[in-house]
Image (tube, rainbow, N blue to C red):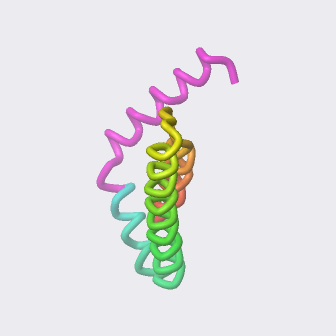
Amino acid sequence: MTPEALETKQNYDREYRKKNRQKINRQQREWRARNPDKVKEYKQRYWEKKARLKAEAEKDGEEAGKEGKTGRKRQDADQESATAEICHF
């Protein structure tokens, strides 16, 4: 998708969500009520991943301190995928 098309779609989606916020929230509540097992699974996977990322970050921090390293971690990509997982409920 071209950058212009992507921007147009993002603007459309943003406006749609503003205009239909109550409808979207109601549909999400209904889905969660119909699928408690999936909600539980998604939440469990989300928190396990958060704990794993935290442990990795602490380990990387300790290693960076020992070796004198600095720099960004790969957490940004992992956090985006975690966010995407929780958007389903």
Q: Position of residue 19 (x, y in %)?
A: 33, 40
Residue at 47% x, 80% y is 40
Whether residue 88 appears in magenta in the rendering, the answer is no
Work out whether residue 2 or residue 52 is closer to the camera in this orientation and state it.
Answer: 52
Judge whether 85 appears above or below 8 on screen: below
Work out whether residue 77 or residue 34 is closer to the camera in this orientation and state it.
Answer: 77
Q: Position of residue 15 (x, y in %)?
A: 38, 33
Work out whether residue 70 or residue 21 is closer to the camera in this orientation and state it.
Answer: 70
Judge whether 37 appears above or below 56 on screen: below
> Magenta part of the protein: which range?
1-23
Quarter of the image for residue 58 reads: bottom left
Whether residue 16 appears in magenta in the rendering, the answer is yes
Q: Position of residue 86 (x, y in %)?
A: 47, 61
Residue at 47% x, 63% y is 55
Q: Is residue 27 left or right of residue 80?
A: left
Q: Is residue 74 left or right of residue 30?
A: right
Q: Residue furthest front?
A: 66
Which quadrant does the C terminus fall into? bottom left
